[in-house]
Image (tube, rainbow, N blue to C red):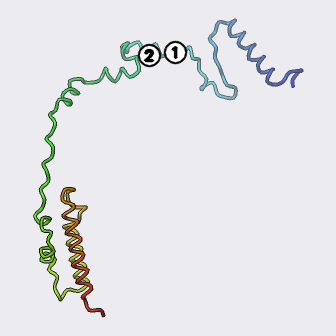
């Protein structure tokens, strides 16, 4: 408490006195924060006048928010882009011949499993068959056939591995 007043009350009185002296002088109100350099405080009124001086050469339409973009927009180019003919839809995919063969005998002939095959050769045949026939690698229309081919090939290879002599 300073002289019977709280600190808050004394600050309010000082600010009121400063406002009265500024109004008497006819100067625009400038709010400054003590402790900050004068480079950060600026007079709002002076800034508005300065901004108007800078914008005198700019068209009135450009002063509206977002209008500057439309002033520079080339409408002829935009119309040409919009008028481009739509491309034809892509042609329907054609099923590869090997996906049409879903009989176990046909798949066994493709795998060419022999009595001389080892576990390593059978695994290589499985990988090679999966690379060419995996459902993830074909169009969605043909995934059922690819799935069926993979199931049959895996069954044939698993059966051949079961028949291998155990060492």
| Residue at (23, 75) in percent of width and height | 126
Q: Which mark's residue is nearer the viewer, 2 or 1?
A: 1
Q: Position of residue 51 (x, y in %)?
A: 48, 16
Instruction: Count all numbered tags in the image, as a single digit.
Output: 2
Question: Is the residue marked by circle 2 packed among few (<14), some (14-19), or many (20+) residues within 10 Å?
Answer: few
Q: CA distance from mark 2 to mark 1?
A: 10 Å
In the displayed image of the protein, which residue is found farthest to the bottom? 167
Q: Are marks 2 and 1 in contact (CB under 8 Å)?
A: no
Residue 142 relative to residue 27: left or right: left
| Residue at (37, 17) in percent of width and height | 62
| Residue at (25, 79) in percent of width and height | 123
Q: Which residue is mark 1?
A: 48
Q: Position of residue 108 (x, y in %)?
A: 15, 77
Q: Position of residue 64 (x, y in %)?
A: 40, 17
Q: Position of residue 69 (x, y in %)?
A: 34, 24
Q: Earlier in the sequence, mark 2 or mark 1?
A: 1
Question: Is the residue marked by circle 1 packed among few (<14), some (14-19), or many (20+) residues within 10 Å?
Answer: few
Query: Eyeballing the image, is 17 above or below 153?
Result: above
| Residue at (17, 82) in percent of width and height | 113
Query: Eyeballing the image, is 13 above or below 129?
Result: above
Asked where in the image residue 70 lies, by quadrant, the reply is top left
Residue 165 relative to residue 8: left or right: left
Q: Which residue is mark 2?
A: 54
Asked where in the image residue 117 lies, by quadrant, the reply is bottom left
- Under tag 2, what secondary structure? helix
- Under tag 1, what secondary structure? helix
Frontmost residue, 153 versus 1:
153
Residue 64 relative to residue 143: left or right: right
Q: Which quarter of the rendered picture does the N terminus lie within?
A: top right
């Amino acid at each position: 408490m300073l002289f019977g007043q709280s600190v808050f009350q004394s600050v309010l009185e000082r600010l009121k006195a400063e406002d009265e002296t500024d109004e008497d002088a006819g100067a625009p109100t400038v709010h400054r924060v003590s402790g900050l350099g004068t480079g950060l405080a600026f007079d709002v009124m002076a800034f508005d006048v300065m901004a108007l001086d800078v914008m005198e050469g700019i068209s009135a339409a450009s002063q509206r928010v977002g209008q500057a973009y439309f002033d520079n927009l080339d409408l002829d180019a935009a119309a040409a882009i919009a008028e481009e003919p739509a491309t034809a839809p892509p042609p329907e995919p054609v099923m590869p011949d090997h996906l049409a063969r879903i009989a176990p005998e046909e798949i066994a002939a493709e795998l060419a499993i022999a009595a001389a095959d080892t576990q390593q050769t059978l695994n290589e045949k499985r990988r090679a068959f999966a690379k060419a026939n995996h459902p993830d690698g074909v169009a969605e229309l043909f995934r059922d056939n690819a799935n069926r081919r993979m199931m049959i090939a895996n069954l044939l290879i698993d059966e051949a591995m079961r028949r291998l002599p155990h060492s």
